[in-house]
Amino acid sequence: MIYHCNRLTLRADASPEAVEEALDSLRNQGRSIPSVKSFVVGPDFGGEYQWGAVFVIEDLAGYWEYLIHPTHRHTDRVGLPLVDKFASFDVTDDPDPEMAEKIAELHQRRYDSDPELTKLVSDLGEYSGSAAPGRHGEQ
């Protein structure tokens, strides 16, 4: 299993309506993407972030399905413009020693195929972790 985790802090000028739309879109990802086995979206406690989301995915094929699903793309469009600081990371029980590189390659393939997404990400104040463009598994 792969636990794909996102932590984010929103821009001070994000309207409550836009924030709710983005959070609803994150929840919709969990409900509508077939490869998502379970998920949680809510306040992030005990750290420097406001919100968090965790999506449980069985394998790399499911991870790719999650990344390219239209509901995920919708969340990018409505949510990323609201984000100031974003971090993503993955936790897995898969023993493959190359898992970090394989996950990073999936993210990079997605960025390479979607210039609009790459632009949205480049406009963030801070972005780190497994999904950050060009990181290839750096933590």
Image (spheres, grey):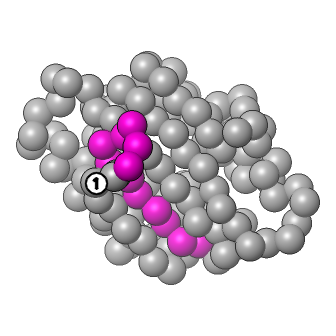
Give left or right: position of 5 versus 53: right
Query: Which residue is farthest front?
Result: 46
Residue 112 versus residue 52: which sits nearer the camera? 52
Q: Is 66 above or below relative to 72? A: below
Residue 123 versus residue 94: which sits nearer the camera? 94
Q: Is 84 above or below relative to 17? A: above
Name the residue tied to disc 1: 43
Q: Which residues are magenta?
A: 46-57
Q: Is residue 58 visible?
A: yes
Residue 12 placement (x, y as % from top left)? 20, 24
Residue appearing at x 39%, y 37% in the figure: 48
Magenta stretch: includes residue 59: no
Residue 62 versus residue 130: which sits nearer the camera? 130
Residue 22 placement (x, y as % from top left)? 25, 48
Give left or right: position of 11 versus 31: left
Number of other residues with Cα within 10 Å of mark 1, as a class: few under 14, some 14 to 19, many 20 or more: few
Residue appearing at x 18%, y 49% in the figure: 21
Check the picture and name the quadrant holding the C terminus.
top right
